[in-house]
C-alpha cells in the first residue's frame, strides 16, 4: 500500500468519480490512476468502486469506509510534515485562505497587511468562491482555513470558530425617496426593485426570511456575486441594493447613500472553518488571532481538541 494510491483514491472520490478531472488535478494520467486503484483493491481484497465499463459509477459500502480512512491517513501525513517544518523553520511555509469576496475585499485587508509584514517568507494565497465552494476547498485539503458566513456550518468535517457579527444596509442613489423616511421598513423597501447577493452568498437566506416572515415578496431584479457589482448597478439606477454594512464606504462610494437596516434583518456571524484533526502551524494560529483577536492559540486549540 502506498500513499500515492491513497491520494489517487481520495481525489477520485472528491471529483465525484470523474477520472479525467482527478487526473488533471493530480497531473497524471487516467490509466495510471485506474491501475493504482486496482492494485489497492487487489491488496485489500475488496472492490472500492463499482465500474460501468471504464467509468467508475459508484463507491461500494466498504469503499466508503476505505475512503474515510484514507482521508484521515493523508491528513496525518500532512500533519507530520507540518510538525517537522514548524521545528526546523517556523517562518517559512504557505497559507491558503478560502473566503468570499465580501470578506476578501472589506474584512481581510488589515489582517493581510499585518500578516505579510510579520511573516514575509510565508506564501499567502487567497482563493475566492461562494461559502459552499470555499468549505469544500478546506475539506479537500486545498485550503487551510475558510472564512465565510453561511454554509460552513453544514460541513461536519470542519471545526467552526465564530469571529464577529454583522448586519446589512440599504444602498440607494442620492435623493432616493427612501432617504426621506424617518425609519425604513420592509414594506417601504419592497416597493422598489432590489439588487442583492446571489442565493449562495453572504446572508441571502436572512434577507429572504425577513420578507417571508412579513408575507412580503421582494422584487429582486438582479443578483450578483459581490457587493461591488451590486453597487455598480445601483449607481446605474436599476434598483436599491441590500449589502453587508461593511461593504459601504462613504469616502469611496460618493455617488451612493447608505441606510442602516440592522433592525430589519437578523444578524449574521462570520466564522473560520478549519478541517478537523489538522495540525495548525504557529503562523496559522497567528493569522486567526489577527483576524479575530478573541481567537487566541489556547481558544483555537481547545476548540480543535474538543472535536477529536
Image (tube, helix red, strand yellow):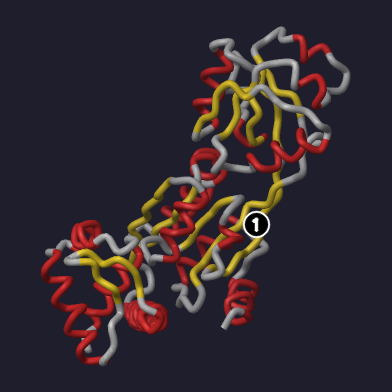
Q: In this rendering, is residue 52 above or below 226?
A: below
Mark 1, residues whose alpha carbon is within 10 Å: few (<14), some, or many (≥20)? some
> Looking at the image, which is closer to me, 73 or 23?
23
Give how far across and how far down residue 182 sits, in percent.
Answer: 88, 18
The structure residue drawn at horizontal position 43% and vertical position 64%, both measured from the top left corner, is: 144
Q: In this rendering, is residue 134 above or below 254?
A: below
Left or right, residue 48 beside residue 248? left
Give how far across and how far down residue 89 sits, in percent.
Answer: 33, 75
Figure quadrant of the C terminus = bottom right
- Asked whether the viewer can see residue 197, the reply is yes
- Asked whether the viewer can see residue 92, the reply is no
Residue 159 found in image quarter: bottom right
The structure residue drawn at horizontal position 57% and vertical position 59%, both measured from the top left corner, is: 272
The structure residue drawn at horizontal position 54% and vertical position 35%, both measured from the top left corner, is: 198
In this figure, which residue is indicated by the disc labeled 1?
A: 163
Q: Residue furthest front?
A: 52
Q: In this rendering, is residue 285 above or below 199?
A: below
Give how far across and how far down residue 31 sits, in percent.
Answer: 11, 68
Left or right, residue 299 beside residue 140? right
Figure quadrant of the N terminus = bottom left
Circle 1: element type: strand
The structure residue drawn at horizontal position 75% and vertical position 21%, both measured from the top left corner, is: 190
> Looking at the image, which is closer to me, 171 or 286?
171
Give how far across and how far down residue 61 sits, in percent.
Answer: 41, 80
Left or right, residue 167 beside residue 254? right
Q: Residue furthest right?
A: 182
> Looking at the image, which is closer to me, 124 or 172?
172
Q: Residue furthest top?
A: 175
Q: In this rendering, is residue 235 above or below 134?
A: above
Task: Count the marks.
Answer: 1
Amino acid at each position: 500500500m502506498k500513499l500515492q494510491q491513497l491520494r489517487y483514491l481520495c481525489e477520485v472520490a472528491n471529483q465525484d468519480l470523474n477520472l479525467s478531472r482527478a487526473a488533471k488535478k493530480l497531473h497524471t494520467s487516467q490509466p495510471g490512476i485506474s491501475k493504482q486503484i486496482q492494485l489497492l483493491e487487489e491488496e485489500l481484497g475488496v472492490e472500492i468502486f463499482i465500474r460501468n465499463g471504464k467509468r467508475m459509477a459508484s463507491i461500494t459500502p466498504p469503499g466508503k469506509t476505505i475512503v474515510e480512512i484514507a482521508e484521515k491517513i493523508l491528513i496525518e501525513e500532512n500533519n507530520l510534515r507540518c510538525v517537522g517544518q514548524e521545528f526546523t523553520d517556523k517562518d517559512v511555509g504557505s497559507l491558503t485562505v478560502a473566503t468570499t469576496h465580501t470578506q476578501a475585499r472589506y474584512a481581510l485587508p488589515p489582517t493581510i497587511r499585518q500578516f505579510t509584514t510579520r511573516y514575509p517568507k510565508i506564501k499567502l494565497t487567497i482563493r475566492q468562491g461562494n461559502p459552499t465552494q470555499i468549505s469544500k476547498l478546506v475539506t479537500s485539503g486545498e485550503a487551510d482555513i475558510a472564512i465565510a458566513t453561511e454554509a460552513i456550518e453544514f460541513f461536519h468535517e470542519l471545526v467552526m470558530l465564530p469571529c464577529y457579527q454583522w448586519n446589512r444596509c440599504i444602498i440607494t442613489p442620492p435623493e432616493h425617496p427612501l432617504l426621506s423616511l424617518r425609519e425604513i421598513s420592509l414594506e417601504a423597501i419592497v416597493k422598489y426593485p432590489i439588487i442583492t447577493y446571489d442565493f449562495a452568498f453572504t446572508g441571502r437566506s436572512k434577507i429572504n426570511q425577513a420578507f417571508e416572515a412579513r408575507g412580503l415578496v421582494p422584487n429582486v431584479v438582479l443578483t450578483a456575486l459581490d457587493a461591488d457589482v451590486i453597487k455598480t448597478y445601483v449607481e446605474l439606477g436599476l434598483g436599491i441594493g441590500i449589502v453587508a454594512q461593511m461593504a459601504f464606504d462613504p469616502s469611496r462610494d460618493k455617488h451612493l447613500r447608505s441606510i442602516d437596516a440592522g433592525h430589519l434583518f437578523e444578524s449574521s456571524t462570520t466564522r473560520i472553518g478549519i478541517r478537523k484533526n489538522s495540525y495548525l502551524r504557529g503562523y496559522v494560529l497567528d493569522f486567526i488571532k489577527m483576524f479575530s483577536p478573541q481567537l487566541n492559540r489556547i481558544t483555537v486549540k481547545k476548540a480543535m481538541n474538543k472535536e477529536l
